[in-house]
Image (spheres, rainbow, N blue to C red):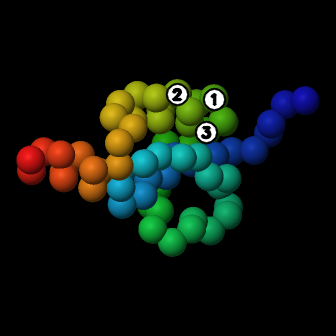
Amino acid sequence: MTDATHYRVVRNDEDQYSIWPVGRELPLGWSEEGTVGDRETCLDRIEQLWTDMRPRSLREHLAAG
């Protein structure tokens, strides 16, 4: 069974990424990153972008010491 759904890469305020079906309204707090395609394409893009899995607030807190 193949997934014919087109997805977009989305990001929240904590710099966490996900995929979301094209045509569905984004949940509050999420915005489009710009990549649209099949599931594999979008997941590959997230792998390139999301190199630090920690939420941004935690990274900033740790950087502040």
Helix, strand or loop under label 2: helix
Marks 2/1: CA–CA distance: 6 Å
Residue type, numbered disc 2: Asp
Marks 3/1: CA–CA distance: 8 Å
Q: Nearer the viewer, residue 3 or 15?
A: 15
Q: Nearer the viewer, residue 33 or 29?
A: 29
Helix, strand or loop under label 3: strand
Residue type, numbered disc 1: Glu
Q: Which residue is mark 3?
A: 37
Look at the picture and state if 47 lies above or below 9. Answer: above
Marks 2/3: CA–CA distance: 10 Å
Q: Position of residue 33 (x, y in %)?
A: 42, 50
Q: Position of residue 1 (x, y in %)?
A: 90, 29
Helix, strand or loop under label 1: helix
Q: Which residue is mark 2?
A: 44
Residue drawn at x 63%, y 29% is 40
**Rendered image quadrant of residue 29:** bottom left
Q: Position of residue 20 (x, y in %)?
A: 62, 52
Residue drawn at x 35%, y 31% is 51
Look at the picture and state if 48 lies above or below 33. Answer: above
